[in-house]
């Protein structure tokens, strides 16, 4: 084993260490996902996710899909290096990219299937109101875009789209509360901010009904 490792080329060393790192990261993600599904509060995904959604609502660039790309691609490249002659070592790069892309696609398809199962299940969105969740993908401020949240409710682990009326974005790992559901999307606010949002909405409705700002009404009284 030691001799084999010492005889590796520079390219094979890159594949080896990249494969080790990506595989460990993938295993940790699986463990944390299992812990979360049993009611744990652990979360591995950071703010580095690039939220490019497909038509199914599944993000293409996620930590899981990128990790799978590097893990499968690196080991496939290393295996190709071991089987190919010295003149054909460049083929390992092509094989690594193709194998990684295939793994990426498989992860996306699996996530899409899981999402469909969740949508086709017995989840009742209206009963999620009042539940607390953890921000998984940053939620842009003032409904300028969608983010994602995760929570365990109704006996299952869920990943849902989310928007917020807050004037500040909701960062990854922040604890939020679901205050409403609209068009298969949750409306969330930081814990403690729900009453502020309701008060603002109430003042706005009062002004519209009376035709006079709330402050002016008080002065008249």
Image (cartoon, rainbow, N blue to C red):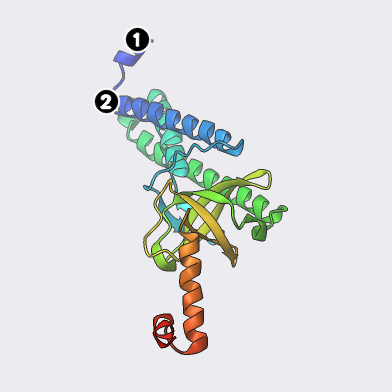
Q: Residue furthest right?
A: 122
Pointer 2 residue? 10
Q: Is residue 88 left or right of residue 206?
A: left
Residue 70 spot, x, y in % from top left: 40, 37
Q: Secondary structure at mark 2?
A: helix
Identity of the residue drawn at 38% across and 40% down = 94
Q: Is residue 178 left or right of residue 164?
A: right
Identity of the residue drawn at 47% across and 55% down = 192
Closer to us: 43 or 193? 193
Query: How much space separates mark 1 and mark 2, taking CA atoms?
Result: 16 Å
Residue 22 spot, x, y in % from top left: 41, 32
Residue 64 spot, x, y in % from top left: 47, 41
Report the number of discs. 2
Residue 190 appears anywhere in the view:
yes
Closer to us: 15 or 213? 213
Query: In this picture, is 10 found above or below 99?
Result: above
Q: Are marks 1 and 2 in contact (CB under 8 Å)?
A: no
Q: Give the quadrant of residue 14.
A: top left
Residue 157 spot, x, y in % from top left: 61, 44
> Badge 1 local density, few (<14 within 10 Å), some, or many (20+)?
few
Badge number at residue 2:
1
The quarter of the picture where the C terminus appears is: bottom left
Q: Residue furthest bottom?
A: 211
Q: Secondary structure at mark 1?
A: helix
Q: Residue furthest left?
A: 10
């Amino acid at each position: 084993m030691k001799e084999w490792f010492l005889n590796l080329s520079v390219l094979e060393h890159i594949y080896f260490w990249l494969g080790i790192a990506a595989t460990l990261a993938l295993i940790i993600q699986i463990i944390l996902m299992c812990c979360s599904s049993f009611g744990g509060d652990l979360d591995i995904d950071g703010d580095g996710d690039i939220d490019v959604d497909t038509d199914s609502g599944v993000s293409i660039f996620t930590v899981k899909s990128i990790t799978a790309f590097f893990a499968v691609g690196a080991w496939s490249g290393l295996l190709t290096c071991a089987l190919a002659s010295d003149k054909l070592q460049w083929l390992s790069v092509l094989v690594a990219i193709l194998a990684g892309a295939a793994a990426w696609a498989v992860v996306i398809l699996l996530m899409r299937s899981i999402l469909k199962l969740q949508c086709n299940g017995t989840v009742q969105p209206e009963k999620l109101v009042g539940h607390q969740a953890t921000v998984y993908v940053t939620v842009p401020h003032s409904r300028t875009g969608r983010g994602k949240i995760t929570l365990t409710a109704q006996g299952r682990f869920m990943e849902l789209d989310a928007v917020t009326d807050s004037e500040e974005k909701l960062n990854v790992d922040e604890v939020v509360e679901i205050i409403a559901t609209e068009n298969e999307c949750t409306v969330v606010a930081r814990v403690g901010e729900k009453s502020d949002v309701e008060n603002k909405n109430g003042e706005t409705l009062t002004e519209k009904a009376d035709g006079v700002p709330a402050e002016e009404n008080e002065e008249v009284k």
